[in-house]
Image: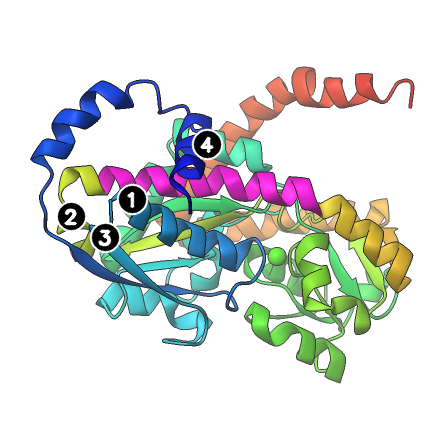
Amino acid sequence: MKRRDFLAGLAAAGVAGCAKTEQAGDTARASAETFEWKMVTTWPANFPGLGTGAADLARMIQAASGGRIRIQVFAAPELVPAFEVFDAVSRGTADIGHGGAYYWKGKTEAAQFFAATPFGMNAQERNAWMFYGGGEELWRELYAPFNLVPAAAGNTGIQMGGWFKKEIRSLDDLQGLKMRIPGLGGDVLRRAGGTPVNLPGGEIFTALQTGSIDATEWVGPYNDLAFGLYQAASNYYYPGWHEPGTTLEAIFNRESLDALPEDLQEIVFMACRTVNGNMLAEYTARNQAALETLVRDHGVQLRRFPDDVLKRLKELSDEVMEEIAARDAMARKIYESQLAFQKQVSKWHDVSELAYYQARDLTR
Ligand code: CA
């Protein structure tokens, strides 16, 4: 990453204003000690948005630290398989990981709430909750027993509902449906009569093409086009009720992070915040062109889930999350924090975002 790109990123994050005068003194005091870090990710190498976002994070930390932190990036499964990233960073095999919190539901069910909540907050609302609504504090509390420190480091925006070999006309079409869908959304699909499967990104296409699954969600047009999913299923559904603004995470090994001097710790978290915003901008910029390519060049059928299907999925989502909260005290704390925040922020968005979209469309 070029230096001016990084500075532009800082300016976008609103932190550039006070940097100049303090920087000179801090740089003079900065320790010359260097740190060799390993990063492991749950993404295929150089995968657009997700894999490149993780690589950007490593590059920014390295550049902004003047090379005092050097990071070697291992995509899945170069050093460890995708779903072992959490353990690898926890035990110190790697110092930093990049992935999605819902992959760790086997470690702690409550982790899922930090990736995406079905029918929950969108990207803008989740960021507000994370940074100004107590979200990141709860996340740190949840991961502390695992020797990990998490940070939001990417957001895909609202995802697509997924790729289906057969049309979804009613709830009956979900019965027996074998679908790759991680996290809470997967639990909801099970409740609706389907069979959720959790596969890392790199294994989705083959599973769908060979028929070992009937349907899959992945991210959105930009990423789904890159995987060629249209070659294996032609019905492309929206909206992504199960992932309305998915947060990607950076996780740090506690000892690796604690070993850094204060200025480098600050750089590490500023880089996370920058990637968090950049990734959402990238998806927002690129999804529509990819969607047009899918429909125009690849004959994809763009379809909206029927209202009664969405309504039932919403009811089941509430049930599933209530039950998790009932059996897990941390999940209860996180879920209630999200519910309260969503309630107030969506009221604001009724008179701001929603009212504006409606106003903008009056003459369309
Ligand atoms: Ca997804």
Assess whether mark 2 and mark 3 are in contact (beta carbons under 8 angstroms). yes
Q: Nearer the viewer, residue 175 or 47?
A: 47
Tell whether label 3 touches label 1 (CB within 8 Å): yes
- Percent across and percent down for residue 192 are 71, 61
Mark 1 falls on what kind of element? Answer: helix
The residue that label 1 is drawn on is 268
Q: Is residue 169 visible in this depiction of the protein?
A: no
Question: Split into 4 quadrants, where in the image is the C terminus?
Answer: top right
Q: Which residue is mark 3?
A: 69
Residue at horizontal 43 percent and vertical 56 percent from the top: 55
Q: Secondary structure at mark 4?
A: helix
Depth check, mark 3 against mark 2: the one in front is 3
The majority secondary structure of the magenta stretch comes to helix
Q: Residues within 10 Å of mark 3 (few under 14, many from 20)?
A: many
Q: CA distance from mark 2 to mark 1?
A: 10 Å
The numbered mark, 1 or 4, whose residue comes first in the sequence reads 4
Checking the image for residue 129, the label placed there is: 4
The response on whether ligand 1 sits within 8 Å of label 4 is no
The answer to whether the residue bearing label 1 lies less than 8 angstroms from the nearest atom of ligand 1 is no
